[in-house]
Amino acid sequence: MQPRFLKLLKSRRAVSAVISNMILVAAVIAVGFAMLAWAQSQSSNYTNQYGRAISSDINQLQERIVFEYISYNNSKNNLTVYLMNSGTIGSVSITTAYVNNTPNSTIALRLLSSGASINSLNATMEGYFSIIPYPSLAPGTNYSIKVITGRGSSFVSTFST
Amino acid sequence: MSALFRLRKTRRRLISDSKGFSSIVGAVFAALVMISLISTVFVWSLSQNTLYNNTVTQTRQADLDRSNEKIVVLNTTYTPYNNSKVNVYAQIQNIGSSSVQFITVWLYMSNSTPWTNYNFSSLVNASVQSGSTFTLNVNLTATGVNPNSTYSISSWLITTRGNTVALQQTIVSPNNIIISQTTQGIGALMMDFQNFTYYNVTGGNQLTPLPNGGQGYVVSSGGGNIVFRVILTDLDQEQRIINLSSSSVFFSIFPTTPQQVRGSYWYVVNVNGSGVISSTYTPVILPYNVPVAVYFASDHAIVSGQPFAGSPPRFTGTAPVNLALIGQLGSNSFGQNIPFVSILILN
């Protein structure tokens, strides 16, 4: 047994075959782990993106805004929109208001009960904002107003000046 | 035969040859890794999809609940006061299948000047169960309003589900009450003598015949229980609200034979929109200058533990009637007797 082992150690041809095999196996394992890591990273990215998209859709679905009253002051060219969050999700902010397709992004939301400045409306909370339409609105005319929430939902109503 | 032999030989060689075994193990391992990765993503996607579907279902249910809110508004009145206040009074009945909560009442006024004004008031504890009635009685500030001008007034309520319930739009003219109508020295309540009505009471405490009943001056009860309806109007000069307590009674003295005076009495009750007498009693509210139908039918004052029980006339013949009314006038105690009616009980 001992002489055969010594012979094997002394044989240069056998050593080169083992080393080449080991290098090959190591390369395969390295490539395999790299592929696994890449696949995991890709699937993680996918689940994150999909999760965010689903979460955004769900939040958007739960948003509901009701227009309680819309008042336009002709002499001051001031449009005040009274809203309520009648949805089941809170933190509904208003980013843009379109009056007959003319956007206005300077929305300062306030609480209906106290007039205090707020960023968003929680469920069943009532608030209002005032904007200065440009061009000013003609008296005795019907207009449409569309508000866009921070989550991207849009709600439309009409009013008469 | 040789083919079978070759097959056996091939199989024996495959079993005995260990070359390629590692490839199979590697392939199986790779397949397991791929399956676990894919199945994890798949199951997670399914859970997200379920979450989305649940939200869609809940949102649909909320929309359905909102569309199922059904409200009937009756007897809307607007009363402008001197102090830039407007009283909004209405009876609101929930005829839907779910309870409704009102959170805000809005008021819009305009006149021919043109002048417009609007305001709102938050409502507390304004929840109405299905089939129940809610009395709205709020004062809203409307700067510049006075009772001597004519206004077009509209009002609407907002529910927590996001519905808008409009109250009747009314044109309110200056207050032309003739003070003598109120018989100032007698009391704040005025009775409408042209609309004095009685009804028979049938099973289930139902008023019959609805809606007109019979003229209250001549009564034919057939020995059964009856209900008297009088129209009362609060004409208090300070425009305060009157509440009638359960002790308010409609009573009559029958001079059947000399020295043998007999009495019949009917205490105040609540009657719903379908003409059914309630077994309990909630104080009848009489807003200023609003004619309100008040019903008298109970054998006793309805209090806790003593529900409604009907009362027949008991006697026949002609008898004077006294309307003994007890309650609150604003924050003060109130009592008034209206003694100007006679009735004839035929049977």
Image (cartoon, rainbow, N blue to C red):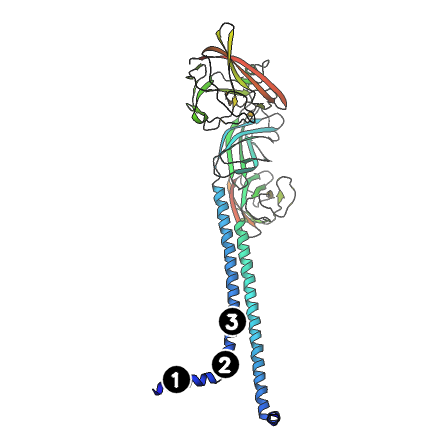
Circle 3 crowding by C-alpha within 10 Å: few under 14, some 14–19, many from 20: few
Q: Which mark is residue B32?
A: 3
Q: Which residue is mark 2?
A: B21
Q: Report the chain holding disc 2.
A: B
Location of mark 1 (residue): B7
Pick whichever, B111 or B230, lies toward us.
Answer: B230
Q: Secondary structure at mark 2?
A: helix
Residue B148 vertical placement versus B54 (above, below): above
Q: Secondary structure at mark 3?
A: helix
Compare marks 3 and 1 and give the one earlier in the sequence.
1
Residue at 53% across / 49% down in the picture? A62
Spatial separation of the CA atoms under disc 3 and disc 1: 32 Å
Residue B339 position in % (x across, y down): 53, 13
Can marks 2 and 1 be said to lie on one chain?
yes
Horizontal and vertical percent position of residue B24: 49, 78
Front-most of B210 and B172? B210
